[in-house]
Image (cartoon, helix red, strand yellow):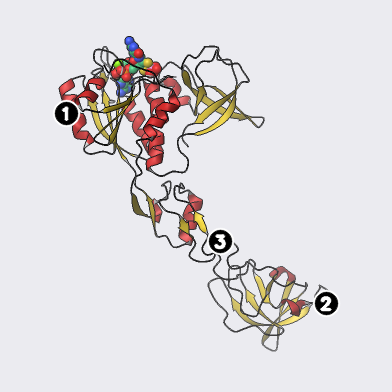
Amino acid sequence: MLNERNPIPVQEAIAKVRSCYQTGQTEWVPLTEAASRILAIDITADHHVPPFDRSPYDGYAIRSVDTTGASTDQPQQLEVVGHIGAGSVYTEPLTDQQAVRIMTGAAIPEGADAVVMLEDTTALEIEGKSYVNVMKTIAHQQNVSFKGEDVRQGEVIMKKGTEINPGVIALLATFGYASVPVAKKPVVGVIATGSELLEVSDPLEPGKIRNSNAYMVMAQLERAGAIPHYYGQLADDLESSIEKISAVLEEVDFLITTGGVSVGDFDLLPEIYQALEADVLFNKVAMRPGSVTTVSTTANKLLFGLSGNPSACYVGFELFTRPLIDHYLGKVQIGLYRTEALLDADIPKANPFSRFIRGYYYLQDQTVFVQLAGKDKSNMVHSLANANCLIELPGGTAGFNKGDRVLIHRLGE
Ligand SMILES: Nc1nc2c(c(=O)[nH]1)N[C@H]1C(S)=C(S)[C@@H](COP(=O)(O)OP(=O)(O)OC[C@H]3O[C@@H](n4cnc5c(N)ncnc54)[C@H](O)[C@@H]3O)O[C@H]1N2
Ligand code: MOO
Ligand SMILES: [Mg+2]
């Protein structure tokens, strides 16, 4: 009987989902569309950065030996034989007492071994020739930005699974990736169930509520890097629901339903799983909210039966669906980023099951504190909007006090 429910620990449930994970495919996207995607291969430097010795300053490329003893009182005069900006190259080798006027980013000419900054020189013209008075002794290799000092050729500069942030974009551009190999986003179907559901644009009617879960889950999917496909809301009718869900499963990588997973007369998901001959991984988790979260597989596709209660639905997604998407994308960081915070108020209620409370963390006096984001019942929606983390309170505990150190799961990372 599917309604005989045996609660399993949260970590065990997460591990069961993980055992079914698949890694997705790779696709190439233009660099301009690669931000926030996940890199699908290791990137190895195929050249040095910078690719040539270059000047870090506007000034003169010189031979340091020619500046020995130079000072403000005793400047050394050099002949200026060339003038280059970044992008230009001076091709003649520099010889005794010669200098090339050089700008930041330009290649150091052959024969030069240092640069003197413009501020340490004065320019002069003698009989139509350009000279520079160097007023400082410059050491060998002083003021040179060396070939390969930033990145060495052959170095692995970015690992597969890296999230492409603006810095990664800069590196990809440096190495000529006009298009970038990234993890293909999974397409995740979303279906809301329940005859009580109104469309968002509908006016309220007696006994009915607007469907908020579907839109919330689609936003969570986008935040996690997946492509949500919305298939609408289903009334509590077994035959048409089986038909719809089977059809949708053909089109998506995973499917999320919300509602109908508990033991009520119109909670049809257990029967639907049976009809689809789905293998139910678990249908009860020792946690609150989201205890009735059910995950099953059929035809090699995962079905996430998230609870109808908005907060339970939200937490079920973050704990079970989100890590699977992270795996699918080959991310380095799996699941929400966890850290510790100090409770800023008592939470006296005992916890038979682990609890994931909607929280709001903040920094004060260089310490991270966390407070409740609002009312915390699983059928409530308001506090979700204020939450920036979930506070994990382990099961089998008698309550928590202000100042206790707790684990928080930061949302949105
Ligand atoms: N006798 C028992 N009753 C319940 C149990 C139980 O163990 N024994 N579990 C409770 C828990 S815990 C939860 S959580 C809920 C789970 O309910 P379902 O997943 O079956 O969801 P529904 O019955 O369809 O709806 C529950 C609740 O959520 C509202 N809802 C549903 N869909 C949406 C939506 N798309 N947007 C906004 N709100 C939605 C729905 O109207 C109900 O109020 O069961 C408890 N009962
Ligand atoms: O699954 Mo229910 O949310 O535990 O409240
Ligand atoms: Mg129900």
Circles 2, 1 touching at the beta carbon (< 8 Å): no
Q: CA distance from mark 1 to mark 3?
A: 56 Å
Residue 401 at least partly seen: yes
Residue 387: x and y in percent read: 48, 26
Q: Amino acid at mark 3?
A: Val
Vertical placement of residue 310 versus 112, above or below: above
Q: Secondary structure at mark 2?
A: loop
Q: Secondary structure at mark 1?
A: helix
Residue 362: x and y in percent read: 58, 29
Q: Secondary structure at mark 3?
A: loop
- Most extreme residue toward the bottom, as rendered? 127
Residue at the spot x=40%, y=40% of the render? 327
Vertical placement of residue 69 versus 267, above or below: below
Q: CA distance from mark 2 to mark 3?
A: 40 Å
* Residue on which disc 3 sits: 151
Question: Residue 74, which numbered label?
Answer: 2
- Quarter holding the N terminus? top left
Between 410 and 265, the one lying in front of the other is 265
Classed neighbour count for the residue bearing mark 2: other residues with Cα under 10 Å, few (<14), some (14–19), many (≥20) = few
Circles 2, 3 touching at the beta carbon (< 8 Å): no
Does the beta carbon at disc 2 come under 8 Å from ligand 2?
A: no
Q: Amino acid at mark 1?
A: Glu
Residue 15: x and y in percent read: 41, 31
* Residue on which disc 1 sits: 243
Q: Amino acid at mark 2?
A: Gln
Classed neighbour count for the residue bearing mark 3: other residues with Cα under 10 Å, few (<14), some (14–19), many (≥20) = some
- On screen, residue 288 versus residue 57, left or right, reads left
- Sequence-wise first label, 2 or 1: 2
